[in-house]
Image (cartoon, rainbow, N blue to C red):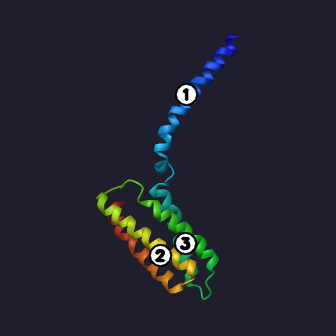
């Protein structure tokens, strides 16, 4: 009987702890669901990452739009959450501005891929290429 009572009390206490913790977990959900800057950059810029893969696919005479659309969607999703990370180094205003610009360029790439517009996709990739160094100089 004592074991049953102890197990019941333990279960109630565990439930209270988990329930009370879930409110704070919910409040931080957005922050916990955001990949780190490092994780985002690894996916986008690793040797066979999204950036190089999209660029290579767009350089082909016949663009495989289904593959480009899939990659550009992921690129856009990652770029759109980059600025939710805290500024790693340097001026926070600059970080915000550069992240918004990067996200806008990734969105333009994704939209161009959806429309199968090679010229617009290449233009967006050119802007993404140029955005890297400025951000790295100040924030890396």
Residue beneath the point at 42% across and 77% down: 127
Q: In which quarter of the view is residue 72 placed? A: bottom right
Is the N terminus in the top left, top right, bottom left or bottom right quadrant?
A: top right
Query: Where's residue 138, x and y in %?
Result: 31, 63
Cα–Cα gap, marks 1 and 2 = 47 Å
Closer to the N terminus: mark 1 or mark 3?
A: 1
For the question of whether residue 3 can be seen, the reply is: yes
Query: Where's residue 130, x and y in %?
Result: 39, 75
| Residue occupied by mark 1 | 16
Which mark, by number, is residue 82?
none
Residue at the outermost top position: 2
Closer to the N terminus: mark 3 or mark 2?
A: 3
52 or 2: which is nearer to us?
Answer: 2
Is the C terminus in the top left, top right, bottom left or bottom right quadrant?
A: bottom left
Cα–Cα gap, marks 1 and 3 = 44 Å
Q: Nearer the viewer, mark 1 or mark 3?
A: 1
């Amino acid at each position: 009987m004592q074991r049953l009572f102890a197990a019941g009390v333990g279960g109630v206490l565990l439930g209270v702890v988990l329930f009370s913790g879930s409110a704070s977990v919910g409040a931080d959900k957005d922050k916990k669901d955001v990949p780190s800057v490092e994780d985002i950059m690894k996916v986008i810029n690793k040797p066979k990452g999204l950036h190089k893969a999209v660029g290579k696919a767009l350089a082909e005479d016949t663009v495989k739009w289904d593959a480009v659309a899939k990659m550009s969607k992921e690129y856009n999703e990652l770029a759109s959450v980059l600025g939710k990370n805290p500024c790693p180094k340097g001026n926070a205003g600059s970080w915000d501005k550069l992240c918004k610009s990067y996200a806008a360029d990734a969105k333009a790439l994704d939209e161009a891929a959806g429309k199968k517009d090679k010229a617009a996709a290449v233009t967006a990739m050119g802007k993404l290429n140029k955005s890297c160094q400025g951000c790295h100089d100040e924030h890396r």
